């Protein structure tokens, strides 16, 4: 650990992988694992995690067993290794019986440097027996955050990986992840029994990525098109949408605007998905429009932008998805447009899921944190890194809030009107209804409930419906209001609302852009 760097590691780096020198903590990690130590590696996407176990695999006696959650990821990694002359193979459900037996034989006879295995397979008795017969160099657990329910990507099979340590206590283990907030980190240590592992935390900053988050003013697609044309003409990018239908619609629309945009989601036939992925990897300037199904394990270094047309469900998801941009270290953009409807849809999806209440609360907190990141008026990178327990001394100068400080306004009086409207209508109604009451729009429902008679009816005529909607969204995002998901999505006051209603607390909010607001019209996006 503290000795001289192992010269053999550098030789392997140069001879096998063709790189000149190690990056960041790679050498220290490799030396530690080669010497038989356990390691927990937190390194941003593109940081070079793979070499941290691939080189020890070549330097230690026996075969390294690599646990990896996605089949596509395994195939790519193994193909790249084989091309470099490394004896690597994988075992997963894509192999037929004979192919699997052949790999098993190669493992037994010590002919493999690395074997990639899906986590569910590792738990099978047949696999356990096989491992007993093999000489194991180390265990590498990739995407280690999958072990945690706090993580955004929980996979129950990962929990069984603790068995590895019990059965093979002498074999070193290295767990790696690019996204782990503090509780997730604790879970990884606990469930993988890594209490004695050395922690290598490279921090999470991706300084070459420029963050930009804007509210959807009803013309998100046009904004996206302008963003691509102005900044990334002919360059590769990924556009994320929440639904398959929106993926299809957006890809078709971008194609009509003259761009090369291919849809990718779980509803498309496997061969079409494969074809689109291949084109994205091989051709220049291809944009993939995708649900979150796309991207994990795709090593395309020159993705110049990642755009979100919907709100991601957590900061982890946002960080992981935007992290696919600029892996080559050159400038790249993370661009997002989001709206209140996203929040409602995501909350509804969370509510309808089969998860336990505890899990739902965690998901809700994660979504709130994501919204908080959208709403802040200070440096996005500082907030993002703070979420992961990292620290950045000064504002970054490379996010929208740093580059063009958002205009703010004193929203105290407007917030008081909105909050009292929620209160007077008994905390049972959704945003559309509340806005109608504020604007003094009489309709059948409003008269039926007698809300055309209350004091807040029509007190909001000084603002447009969209301005009120934006305010409600901000009040929800900043925790003054909550959406009642057990009922019918009615908006409720939280404890935080009281000081504002009583005039004890003032409120400064991000100013919605007037220029865009004027243009919004009826165009849906
Ligand atoms: P991660 O798994 O952390 O996202 P990878 O291991 O896929 O990152 O590495 C990202 C990219 O950086 C890959 O293209 C890899 O070949 C390259 N890379 C890794 N280490 C080095 C190095 N020491 N020198 C040059 N390139 C490297
Ligand atoms: Zn910044």
Image: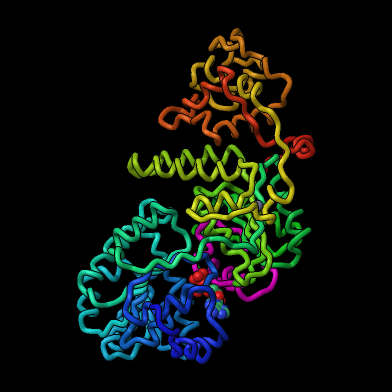
Residue at 54% x, 39% y: name it.
343
Q: Position of residue 37 (x, y in %)?
A: 33, 75
Q: Quadrant location of residue 459?
A: top right
Residue 346 appears in the picture as rendered: yes
Magenta span includes 380 = no
Q: Quadrant location of residue 458?
A: top right
- Where's the C terminus, which quadrant? top right
Q: Quadrant location of residue 61?
A: bottom left
Total numbered labels placed on residues in the image? 0
View extreme (top): residue: 453
Q: Position of residue 488 (x, y in %)?
A: 46, 28
Q: Is residue 387 left or right of residue 286?
A: left
Residue at 63% x, 49% y: name it.
379
User: Depth check: 68 or 18 in front?
Assistant: 18
Does 382 sit above or below residue 288?
Answer: above
User: Depth check: 3 or 364 in front?
Assistant: 3
Q: Position of residue 253 (x, y in %)?
A: 70, 54
Q: How is the image coloured?
A: rainbow
Does 58 sit above or below residue 521?
Answer: below
Q: Position of residue 200 (x, y in %)?
A: 43, 68
Q: Is residue 67 left or right of residue 400?
A: left
Residue 287 appears in the picture as rendered: no
Q: Is residue 108 left or right of residue 522?
A: left
- Where's the N terminus, which quadrant? bottom left
Residue at 22% x, 75% y: name it.
168
User: Depth check: 32 or 422 in front?
Assistant: 32
Magenta span includes 281 = yes
Does 422 sit above or below residue 106?
Answer: above
Residue at 65% x, 64% y: name it.
208
Q: Is residue 332 left or right of residue 517?
A: left
Q: Which residues are magenta?
A: 272-300
């Amino acid at each position: 650990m503290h000795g001289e760097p192992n010269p053999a590691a550098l030789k392997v780096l140069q001879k096998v992988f063709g790189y000149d020198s190690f990056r960041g903590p790679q050498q220290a990690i490799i030396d530690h694992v080669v010497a038989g130590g356990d390691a927990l590696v937190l390194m941003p996407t593109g940081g070079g995690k793979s070499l941290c176990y691939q080189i020890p695999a070549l330097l230690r006696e026996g075969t390294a067993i690599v646990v990896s959650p996605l089949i596509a990821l395994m195939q790519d990694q193994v193909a790249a290794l084989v091309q470099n002359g490394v004896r690597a193979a994988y075992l997963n459900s894509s192999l037929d019986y004979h192919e699997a037996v052949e790999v098993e034989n190669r493992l037994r006879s010590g002919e493999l440097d690395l074997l990639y295995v899906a986590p569910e397979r590792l738990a099978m008795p047949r696999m356990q027996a096989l491992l007993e017969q093999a000489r194991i160099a180390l265990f590498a657990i990739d995407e280690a955050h999958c072990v945690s329910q706090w993580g955004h990507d929980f996979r129950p099979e990962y929990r069984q990986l603790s068995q590895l340590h019990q059965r093979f206590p002498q074999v070193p283990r290295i767990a790696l992840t690019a996204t782990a907030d503090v509780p997730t980190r604790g879970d990884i240590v606990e469930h993988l029994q890594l209490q004695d592992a050395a922690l290598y935390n490279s921090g999470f900053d991706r300084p070459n990525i420029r963050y930009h988050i804007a509210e959807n003013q009803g013309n998100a697609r046009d904004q996206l098109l302008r963003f691509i044309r102005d900044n990334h003409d002919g360059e590769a990018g990924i556009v994320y949408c929440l639904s398959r239908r929106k993926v299809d619609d957006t890809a078709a629309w971008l194609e009509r605007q003259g761009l090369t945009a291919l849809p990718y989601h779980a509803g498309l036939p496997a061969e079409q998905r494969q074809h689109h992925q291949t084109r994205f990897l091989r051709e220049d300037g291809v944009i993939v429009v995708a649900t979150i199904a796309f991207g994990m394990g795709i090593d395309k270094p020159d993705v110049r932008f990642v755009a979100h047309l919907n709100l991601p469900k957590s900061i982890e998801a946002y960080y992981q998805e935007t992290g696919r941009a600029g892996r080559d270290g050159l400038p790249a953009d993370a661009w997002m447009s989001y709206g209140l409807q996203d929040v409602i849809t995501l909350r509804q999806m969370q509510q309808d899921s089969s998860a336990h209440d505890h899990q739902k609360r965690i998901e809700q907190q994660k979504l709130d944190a994501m919204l908080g990141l959208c709403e802040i008026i200070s440096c996005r990178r500082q907030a993002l890194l703070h979420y992961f327990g990292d620290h950045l001394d000064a504002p970054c100068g490379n996010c929208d809030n740093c580059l063009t400080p958002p205009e703010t306004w004193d929203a105290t009086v407007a917030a008081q009107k909105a909050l009292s409207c929620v209160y007077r209508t008994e905390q049972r109604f959704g945003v559309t209804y509340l806005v109608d009451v504020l604007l003094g729009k009489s309709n059948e429902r409003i008269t039926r409930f007698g809300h055309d008679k209350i004091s807040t009816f029509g007190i909001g005529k000084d603002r447009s419906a969209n301005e009120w909607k934006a305010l409600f969204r901000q009040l929800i995002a900043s925790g003054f209001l909550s959406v009642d998901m057990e009922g019918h999505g009615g908006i409720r006051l939280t404890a935080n609302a009281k000081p504002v209603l009583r005039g004890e607390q003032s409120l400064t909010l991000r100013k919605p852009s007037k220029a865009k607001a004027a243009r919004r019209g009826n165009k849906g996006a």
